[in-house]
Image (tube, rainbow, N blue to C red):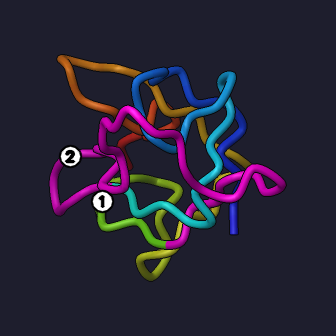
């Protein structure tokens, strides 16, 4: 599973010092590369000893998506239009 190399969405409950600590995230829907695992919460969560990985990708139009699995070596998550998006997304 590809690692979330950087998360620039500081308000995410799983973001601690720019690193994602969700065990696995899900990216997107059929058309948008949003981080479906993102949510804002005053308490930070996840596994502080682990770095988040991409468990599933639902963005069929991304060139890194093979059979709903991300094949990128790593991804960056950042804010785009007030949402947490996979910035590694590249259209086919």
Task: Give coordinates of residue 81: x percent, y percent.
Answer: 18, 17
| Element under disc 1 | loop
Q: Where is residue 66 drawn, in percent x and y?
A: 50, 74
On screen, residue 8 above or below 43: above
What residue range appears in magenta? 28-55
Residue nearest the observer in this picture, 89 or 85: 85
Element on which disc 2 rests? loop
Return the mark for residue 46.
none
Which residue in the structure is indicated by mark 2?
32
Q: Is residue 40 left or right of residue 90?
A: left
Whether residue 75 is in magenta: the answer is: no
> Residue beneath label 1, please?
59
Q: Quadrant of residue 16?
A: top right
Mark 2 burial class by Cα count in 10 Å: few <14, some 14-19, many 20+: some
Q: For residue 32: magenta?
A: yes
> Does the CB distance between marks 1 and 2 fall below 8 Å?
yes
Q: Quadrant of residue 12?
A: top left
> Residue reaching furthest right?
49
Percent position of residue 31, x then y: 16, 52
Q: Name the residue located 35 percent from the left edge and 45 percent from the top edge.
A: 38
Of the residues under marks 1 and 2, which one precedes in the sequence? Answer: 2
Using the image as rendered, state which of residue 73 and residue 79 is in the foreground. 79
**Residue at 45 percent of width and 72 percent of height:** 56
In the rendered image, the quadrant that contains the N terminus is: bottom right
């Amino acid at each position: 599973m590809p690692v979330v190399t950087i998360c620039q969405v500081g308000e995410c409950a799983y973001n601690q010092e720019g690193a994602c600590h969700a065990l696995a995230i899900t990216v997107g829907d059929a058309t948008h590369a949003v981080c479906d695992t993102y949510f804002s919460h005053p308490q930070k969560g996840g596994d502080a000893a682990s770095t988040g990985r991409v468990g599933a990708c639902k963005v069929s139009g991304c060139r890194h998506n093979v059979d709903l699995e991300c094949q990128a070596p790593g991804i960056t998550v950042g804010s785009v239009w007030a949402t947490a998006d996979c910035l590694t997304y590249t259209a086919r």
